[in-house]
Image (cartoon, rainbow, N blue to C red):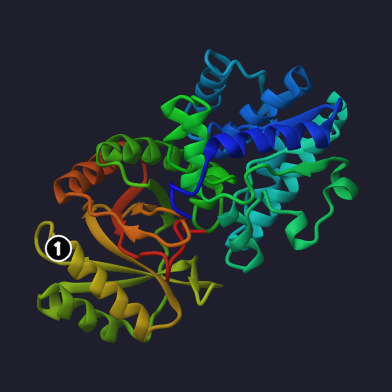
Amino acid sequence: MSSETFNPKSFVERQVDEIRRVIGTGKALVAVSGGVDSSTCAVLAHMAIGDNLLCVFLDDGFMRLDEPERVAEVLSKQPLSLPVRIERVQEPFFKALFGIREAEEKRKAFRKTFYSVLSDIARREGCEYLIQGTILADIIETKGGIKTQHNVLEQIGINPRELYGFKVVEPLASLVKWQVREVARYLKIPPEISERQPFPGPGLSVRVVGEIRLDKLMVLKKATAIVEEHLATYKPSQYFAAILDNNFKPNPNTKKIRDTAAKFLGIDPNRVSIGMFSDKATGVKGGKRRYGNIVAVKCLNNGVYTPPLANLLEMQKAIIESNPSITRVLYLILCSNIRGQYSIVIRAVRTEDFLTANVAEIPWDCLIRCADFILKNCPGVSEVYYDVTPKPPATIEME
């Protein structure tokens, strides 16, 4: 659907009427994150039912630095003036997710905890309805088994009224991301929300690749702030950091992958090093989920080797096509002389609908400055990579 055939004014009028019809004089709860989806839902619901809406920000511990306070301030002030309350709920989320390694298990544990916490709040406040910002991509990825989106329930046979005591209302379920932004702009939602890059519902829990630990999470929060600051000027559709334990496993195809990488990089194979991380990352092939290996490509060049992005994209394509177990290819930007506990991955993509995505072409000098800042300011990090895998075969998020 083109922008010429999508009318945000008509959409808003229909959805406000529908929310008012469904909820009537009842009370509703909406979990706001500061993202465009949940914020747009909150504004639509507030237009429909006014003071019968309660907006909560769940401070689950997986948000970015100072995010709960920043989001609550923006949503509470003019022009939105939404009734926002911060709920400090780190304990149940940490208890549920710490120690889990597998990506899909993390997402399912987050979803269960998310709705259990909201159920407690809804019962306490007398809310019979939950309004949430599920969009079309969330439904497609969850139903297709690519990855569990925490905000998809009824579409996969989960009855929220039976399990959690509320009926779910999803005003945006038929829209893709650009359409949601059109609605947000029409509603005069501030640009820091309407144009904000997406942030996953499970927050940083799905960017802590492998086992979640508190120290690892805190390092990622620092790295995330650095990446967002350095890359913002280039306006990728989405850009962030992920963190990996520096644990590697044997790979019988190392020489084959090394030779492939060297061919596309145009250098001697002896100057290329290949590693395969012990943890895995989520990918997609033929619309189905793949949980596969993460390969790191390093050039031994007595400095930084900066090939064109086109070469790196051709390299990753050849590596993944000849090694079906691999879903992610990373290219080393910088490393320190002392081996640390963690690696940071910089991810930046450009996309219209988030169902497919291209790797963003960020200037090498920016990536190098960003990596250098991470190495100097994030304890335990010894390597910084750029993720050169589009979607497909990778998903945008690591998990």
* In-image side of 305 versus 177 (left or right): left
Question: Mark 1 belongs to which amino acid?
Answer: Pro
- 203 and 162: which one is in front? 162
| Res 38 visible | no
Image coordinates for residue 242, horizontal then vertical, percent: 42, 51
Image coordinates for residue 333, horizontal then vertical, percent: 22, 55
- 66 and 17: which one is in front? 17
- Read off the residue under disc 1: 308
Q: Does 16 sit above or below residue 306?
A: above
- 230 and 154: which one is in front? 154
How many numbered discs, if any?
1
Residue 27 lies in what quarter of the image?
top right
Image coordinates for residue 8, horizontal then vertical, percent: 53, 38
Determine the residue positioned at 35% across, 65% down: 389
Q: Does 387 sit above or below residue 366?
A: below
**Extreme residue toward the top, this view:** 78
- 40 and 11: which one is in front? 11
Image coordinates for residue 23, horizontal then vertical, percent: 82, 33
Q: Residues within 10 Å of mark 1 (few under 14, many from 20)?
A: few
Secondary structure beneath dot 1 equals: loop
Determine the residue positioned at 64% across, 33% down: 13
Residue 262 lies in what quarter of the image?
bottom left
Determine the residue positioned at 10% across, 64% down: 301
Q: Does 179 sit above or below residue 136?
A: above
Q: Does 222 sit above or below residue 146?
A: above
| Res 142 visible | yes
Determine the residue positioned at 56% across, 21% down: 75
* In-image side of 98 versus 186 (left or right): right
* In-image side of 34 versus 342 (left or right): right
* In-image side of 340 versus 6 (left or right): left
